Structures are given as structure tokens and as C-alpha cells.
């Protein structure tokens, strides 16, 4: 994990250095003295190796430096402000996707080849194929402009969280429903389920106590990529719905070529996602006693 | 009561079948791929998707010539027109014909999908193949590299590459190819690790086949199934990611526009001109849907467990 993180920091740093054009470039020619002062202030005139080592040092101390574009603001500040908002939206989305996705998956597995199964899977396949920004645009158009039920954008009241959550949750919900259905179908065919049936257990007990526990494993493995996809989806969705989260800062910083902020948020995101993946692995071994976390080969 | 049965020569008679004939196959043999194709043909959804993909591809080639507008001609007096007889899908905010632009966008998006899948196929298969076949420290080093790259969040990595490089069709292909070959390499390596221990590989070695021959003539043809499924599913994934990059302004540059860029433009005027989002969104979703359904169908057809 440390190597991967080091790799990201290095890639981002040198990547940002080789891009032509920078945040201080504008149509107007800048007087050399001003340019020199600016470069001095942000330590851009130091040799590259020194800048790199400086940056590594600062990343370890969790300081990502000032924003080039917005004087007086720093990347750390933006992360501090944006992350709670994004995390709230992300948590809502994960919750929604899990509840709806799992129930849809279970229902369609139990009622395989019935209308419940077909309609759930048609919906899931559509949800799987619609990009989040299309979903966001569509929802905004229907519910905010045509029906006038909800304000199209902004963040604050619980009502305003509905549309972004729905737009973000489309893809993960569909994914979870499909995964849950196929793994449930597979588990239900296994011998131990037949044993449970033949010893007279009720259907409810069989499904919730016996089948679910095994069938849910693929979904848990998927939680890592799921969180990643929600975060990346949130770049666009936050931008469209003007949610002041981390994703929107990221998008604006890309558009402004605001290096320190891009670098800071990239490193932050990567670290966050790696920790999430680690937690998913740990959860996996906690739920399934057959999985043991041992380093190396057996 | 015990019935005793006396077995005697007379009780048996020749039914008129020759020993030689018993060995003759009376039905034509079907190869694995014929079998796959037969199963695929029975899957109506997958076939419909295949037809739809073909139609979209053909339209992307010919549809821009259906009317006389070009994708870059701006007629500012005729901006934001709703769909009508002259402008079938309406016009955009600069008075450009949306129909022509959409099919030009289809060319970009489909190109990106197919080419990315091809790049992924080539790099992934060769990398994974070498790693799996050689094994030992080579495998160790090669897979460590993949693992490190793998733990970097995919899309962040693509964004970074796109920010670093000037956006164009070529750089999008590089960025997408640089990311999506990783799962392919892992998949191929895993398959080859299990296949290379089998007897027929040993037989090939005994006959003096070299590593290259074994890899390309014996191992890879036998892993073709999963490789094909992953390649098919990489196409919608690439189109999806490209649409998303275009939305962030990191896609191909104007006046050419991919579907993602068109949708992003459309979103700006959604309140007054919803068709500007509707048409690109419809085509993106339809294409991704068809590729996904076809990929699913292919997977079912390749997997003998689902065989009825």
C-alpha cells in the first residue's frame, strides 16, 4: 500500500510538472519581476529534485500546500470542507444501493422467471447502462424543471440530497442487484439448502439464516470497487447538482489546472480508497470464516 | 423363491451391427466454437443486441451523409431549434445539425470502444501470457508491478493521464489502454497458470515446441473464452469512461465531439432544450446496453455449466 501511494505521489508530481501551461498563464504577458516573485512565493524556482523531496515531506506531514488559483485557500482546507459533504452523500448512496439492490436481487432470485424477476433485471440492466451524468440530467429535468417538486441544485436540506443520491445510486444498485441474484441462485441450488429444506426448516429461515450468508459474499467483495465508483461518479454528480463536496473541488481544480489541489485531492482519494479496500478485505474474513488473511502462499 | 437362469449360447443372436460400424460417428461433429455459436444464436436478447450494434456501427459510417450538413458548420440564426423536418434531431447552441454531430460522435465513441478493447487484448494477453508461462521470478516481478498499478484507483489514474497529456483521440486511447489491460493480464495469467500443468502442454513440449509456440498455439486458444468476454465488456466500459472524461472537458477537442461531449453540451441547456441531452444520452445508453447484454450472452454461451 505504501509503495502504491508513493507511486501515485510521484506520478502526480512529475505529471503536473511536465504539463505545458500553468495556473499563472494568462493572455496577458506577465512582467518578469512579478513572475519571479510568484515563483519564489510558491517555491517554483527551486531545482526539481528539491521541489519533489519537499513535496514528499509535506505529504507525509499531511500538508498539500496552498491553492494556486484561489489565494488564501489551501488544498487541505478544501479537503477538510469537501470531504464531510461527499462522505455524507456517499454514505446515503451506499445505503440506498445496498437496501434496494439487495432486496431486488433476493426477490428476483426467489421468483426466478416470474414478472418480479424480469422487471427487476430489466431495470438493473438499464441502470447499468446509463452514465451517471445522464441520470443526473434526466432527474433534474423531470423532477426539478417539469414537475417543480425539488430545487434543481444546491445542498443543505434533506430534500436536496434526494436527486444526487438517486443519480449516484443508479449504477451501484443495478450492480448489486445483478450480483445478488446470480449468487443467490447459485447458493439455492447447493446441497446444504436441500438438507435444510428436507429437515423441515421454514423458507424464511432457510433464506435469511442459511442462504443469505453465503450469497452475500460476492456483494461484499464488490463493496470496494463500489465505493470507488461512487466517489468518481460523485465528481460529475456533485458538479451538476452544485453540491460543495470534494468531487466538485476536484473537477474545478482540473478545469483550472490548479496543481496543488489536483495533487492533494488525488493523493487523498487514493489513500481513502485503499483504506476502504483494506476494510472490505477485513470484513470479508470476519463474515466468512473460510477466508483467512495470511500473507504469502500456503 | 429362487429362479435359476441358465445362460446359453442360443439365447444371444447377432443384431446385424458390425464392429467397425459401431465406431463410426453418425452425426457430424461440432467443435467447441460451433457449439458456442449455436448456444449464442438461441439467446434472443444477445442476438438482438448484436444486430443493434451492427446497425449502430453501419449508421456511424453512412449516416453523416444522409443530409447535407457538416458537423462543424455553424449557423447562429438557427441555433437551438427543436427537431424538425430539416434538422431531424434539432440544432445545438451554435446552430450545428445535431443529427450529423451525433453520428460523427458515434464514430469517435465506437472507435474508442473498439480500439481500447483491441489494445487491452494485445497488451493484456501478451503480458499475462508471458508472466504465467515463464513463472518464477519473472512472474513475481511482473505481477508485483500489476498489483501496484492495480491499487491505484482506476479513474483517478485516467484523469491524471488525461490532465498530463493533451486531450485527443490518441491520448484517450493511451490513457484507457494503460488502465484496462491490468485486469486482462491478471485473467490471462490465472488461466495460463492452471492450463500449463496439463498433459497436452507436456506432450507439446516433448515434441519440441518452444515457449512461443506453446503460448500462442496451445495456451491462448484455450483461454479464448474468458478473454473474449472480457474484451466485449471492455468496449462499453471504455465508451462509458470516455463519455465521462468528455464531460469533465478531458475528451476529444472541439469541433469534433464524442457522445459524452455532446451530452455534456446538452446538459447546459437542459432546461429549455432537453432534446440536446436526450439524443446523445439515448445513444450512449443504448450502445452500452447492447454491448453489456451481448457480453452477458456470450459469457452464458461460453460457459458449459449453463448448457441445457
Image: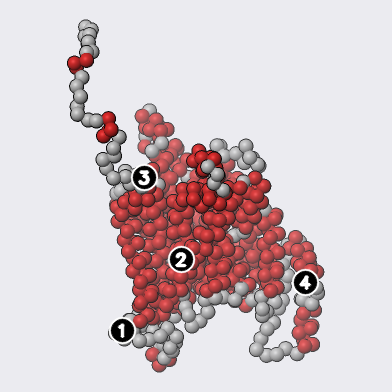
Q: What number of labels is visible?
A: 4
Q: Nearer the viewer, mark 2 or mark 3?
A: 2
On the image, the x and y values in percent for residue A67 come to 69, 74
Residue under the image location 38 percent in, 86 percent down: B69
Mark 3 highlights which residue? B306
Distance (Cα) linking label 1 and label 3: 48 Å
Q: Are marks 2 and 3 in contact (CB under 8 Å)?
A: no
Where is residue B11, by image quadrant?
A: top left
Is circle 1 on the same chain as circle 4? Answer: no
Instruction: Locate the C terminus of chain A by quadrant.
Output: top right
Circle 2: is it few (<14), some (14-19), or many (20+) Cα within 10 Å? some
Residue in front for this viewpoint, B251 or B125: B125
Distance (Cα) linking label 2 and label 4: 40 Å
The secondary structure type at the circle numbered 1 is loop
Rendered image: mark on residue B84:
1
Q: Nearer the viewer, mark 1 or mark 3?
A: 3
Disc 2 chain ID? B
Q: Are marks 4 and 3 in contact (CB under 8 Å)?
A: no
Distance (Cα) linking label 4 and label 3: 58 Å
Rendered image: mark on residue A48:
4
On the image, the x and y values in percent for residue B111 come to 46, 70
Is circle 4 on the same chain as circle 3? Answer: no
Amino acid at each position: 500500500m505504501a509503495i502504491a501511494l508513493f507511486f501515485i505521489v510521484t506520478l502526480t508530481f512529475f505529471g503536473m510538472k511536465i504539463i505545458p501551461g500553468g495556473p499563472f498563464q494568462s493572455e496577458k504577458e506577465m512582467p518578469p519581476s512579478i513572475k519571479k516573485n510568484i515563483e519564489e512565493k510558491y517555491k517554483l524556482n527551486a531545482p526539481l529534485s528539491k521541489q519533489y523531496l519537499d513535496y514528499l515531506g509535506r505529504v507525509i506531514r499531511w500538508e498539500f500546500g496552498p491553492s494556486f488559483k484561489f489565494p488564501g485557500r489551501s488544498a487541505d482546507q478544501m479537503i477538510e470542507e469537501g470531504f464531510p459533504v461527499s462522505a455524507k452523500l456517499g454514505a446515503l448512496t451506499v445505503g440506498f444501493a445496498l437496501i434496494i439492490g439487495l432486496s431486488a436481487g433476493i426477490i428476483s432470485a426467489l421468483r426466478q422467471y416470474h414478472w418480479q424477476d424480469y422487471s427487476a433485471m430489466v431495470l438493473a440492466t438499464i441502470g447499468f447502462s446509463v452514465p451517471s451524468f445522464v441520470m443526473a440530467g434526466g432527474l433534474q429535468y423531470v423532477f426539478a424543471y417539469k414537475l417543480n417538486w425539488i430545487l434543481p441544485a444546491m445542498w443543505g436540506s434533506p430534500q436536496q440530497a434526494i436527486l444526487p443520491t438517486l443519480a449516484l445510486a443508479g449504477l451501484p444498485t443495478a450492480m448489486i442487484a445483478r450480483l445478488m441474484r446470480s449468487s443467490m441462485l447459485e447458493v439455492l441450488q447447493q446441497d446444504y439448502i436441500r438438507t435444510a429444506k428436507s429437515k423441515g426448516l421454514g423458507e424464511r429461515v432457510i433464506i435469511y439464516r442459511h442462504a443469505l450468508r453465503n450469497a452475500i459474499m460476492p456483494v461484499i467483495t464488490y463493496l470496494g470497487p463500489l465505493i470507488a465508483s461512487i466517489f468518481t461518479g460523485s465528481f460529475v454528480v456533485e458538479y451538476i447538482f452544485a453540491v460543495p463536496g470534494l468531487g466538485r473541488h476536484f473537477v474545478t481544480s482540473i478545469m483550472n489546472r490548479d496543481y496543488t489541489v489536483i495533487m492533494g485531492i488525488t493523493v487523498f482519494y487514493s489513500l481513502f480508497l485503499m483504506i476502504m479496500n483494506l476494510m472490505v478485505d477485513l470484513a470479508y474474513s470476519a463474515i466468512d470464516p473460510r477466508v483467512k488473511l495470511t500473507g504469502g502462499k500456503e | 423363491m429362487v429362479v435359476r437362469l441358465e445362460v446359453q449360447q442360443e439365447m444371444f443372436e447377432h443384431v446385424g451391427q458390425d464392429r467397425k460400424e459401431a465406431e463410426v460417428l453418425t452425426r457430424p461433429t461440432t467443435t467447441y466454437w460451433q457449439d458456442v455459436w449455436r448456444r449464442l444464436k438461441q439467446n434472443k436478447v444477445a442476438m438482438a443486441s448484436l444486430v443493434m450494434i451492427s446497425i449502430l456501427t453501419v449508421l456511424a459510417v453512412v449516416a453523416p451523409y444522409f443530409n447535407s450538413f457538416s458537423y462543424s458548420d455553424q449557423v447562429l440564426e438557427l441555433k437551438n431549434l427543436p427537431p424538425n423536418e430539416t434538422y431531424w434531431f434539432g440544432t445545438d447552441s451554435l446552430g450545428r445539425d445535431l443529427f450529423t454531430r451525433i453520428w460523427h460522435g458515434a464514430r469517435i465513441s465506437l472507435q474508442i470502444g473498439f480500439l481500447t478493447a483491441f489494445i487491452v487484448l494485445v497488451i493484456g494477453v501478451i503480458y499475462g501470457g508471458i508472466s504465467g508461462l515463464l513463472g518464477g521470478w519473472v512472474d513475481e516481478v511482473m505481477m508485483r508491478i500489476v498489483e501496484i498499478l492495480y491499487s491505484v484507483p482506476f479513474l483517478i489514474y485516467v484523469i491524471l493521464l488525461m490532465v498530463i497529456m493533451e486531450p485527443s483521440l490518441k491520448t484517450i486511447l493511451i490513457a484507457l489502454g494503460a488502465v484496462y489491460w491490468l485486469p486482462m493480464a491478471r485473467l490471462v495469467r490465472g488461466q495460463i497458470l492452471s492450463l500449463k500443468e496439463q498433459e497436452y502442454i507436456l506432450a507439446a513440449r516433448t515434441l519440441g515446441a518452444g515457449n512461443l509456440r506453446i503460448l500462442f498455439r496451445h495456451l491462448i486458444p484455450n483461454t479464448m473464452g474468458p478473454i473474449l468476454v472480457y474484451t466485449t465488456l471492455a468496449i462499453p466500459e471504455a465508451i462509458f469512461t470516455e463519455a465521462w472524461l468528455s464531460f469533465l472537458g478531458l475528451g476529444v477537442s472541439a469541433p469534433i465531439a464524442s457522445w459524452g461531449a455532446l451530452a455534456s453540451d446538452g446538459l447546459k441547456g437542459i432546461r429549455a432544450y432537453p432534446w440536446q441531452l436526450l439524443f446523445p444520452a439515448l445513444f450512449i445508453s443504448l450502445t452500452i446496453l447492447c454491448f453489456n447484454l451481448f457480453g452477458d450472452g456470450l459469457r452464458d454461451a461460453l460457459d458449459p455449466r449453463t448448457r441445457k
